[in-house]
Image (cartoon, helix red, strand yellow):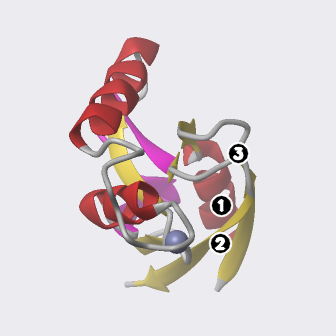
Amino acid sequence: MIRLNVQTAKHTQMLDITAQVQKAVTESGVKNGVCMVFVPHTTAAVTINENADPDVVRDFTTEINKIVPWEDGYHHMEGNSAAHLKSSMIGFSENVIIEDGRLVLGTWQGIYFCEYDGPRSRRVFVKILEG
Ligand code: ZN
């Protein structure tokens, strides 16, 4: 398993980690297989979405904050229930096919680390399976 470090800078943020994940794949030497990306946090997530127009990420962040407001009479003592909810809604893992040593993503797709209670130092686990 490969551990990637991700430093977020904002409370809610989507960081494009495609290059870091591709680097892990390249260094593994695996040419064909599957790359599993897992986020071991309860207030962060990982997703795949458009990395061409930065407004997509901006709209995504704005809308998810509307769907799950930060304050809404939650009971959780830590005060970050909204982050826990968003984390589960978006999800903790993604699988990407590897072909000829490259992640197989659509033309406009990138892998995003989603921060919902930052800024924090985070980790992403990557497992590369050959086959
Ligand atoms: Zn909490």
Give the residue drawn at x 41%, y 45%. 70
Q: Horizontal and vertical percent for residue 83?
A: 44, 57
Q: Nearer the viewer, residue 104 or 101?
A: 104
Q: Nearer the viewer, residue 49 or 23?
A: 49
| Camera-side mark, 2 or 3 | 3
Q: Give the range drawn in magenta.
A: 93-113
Q: In which quarter of the image is residue 98?
A: bottom left
Label 2 residue SS: loop
Is there CB contact under 8 Å for labels 1 and 2?
yes
Q: Horizontal and vertical percent for residue 81?
A: 41, 63
Looking at the image, tell me whether mark 2 or mark 3 is earlier in sequence order. Answer: 3
Give the residue drawn at x 39%, y 46%. 71
| Camera-side mark, 3 or 1 | 3
Give the labeled residue for mark 3: 8
Give the labeled residue for mark 1: 26
- Give the main secondary structure of the magenta stretch: strand
> Is the residue 114 above or below the residue 53 in the image?
below
Give the labeled residue for mark 2: 29
> Distance of mark 3 from mark 1, alpha carbons?
24 Å
Label 3 CA crowd tier, 10 Å (few <14, some 14–19, many 20+): many
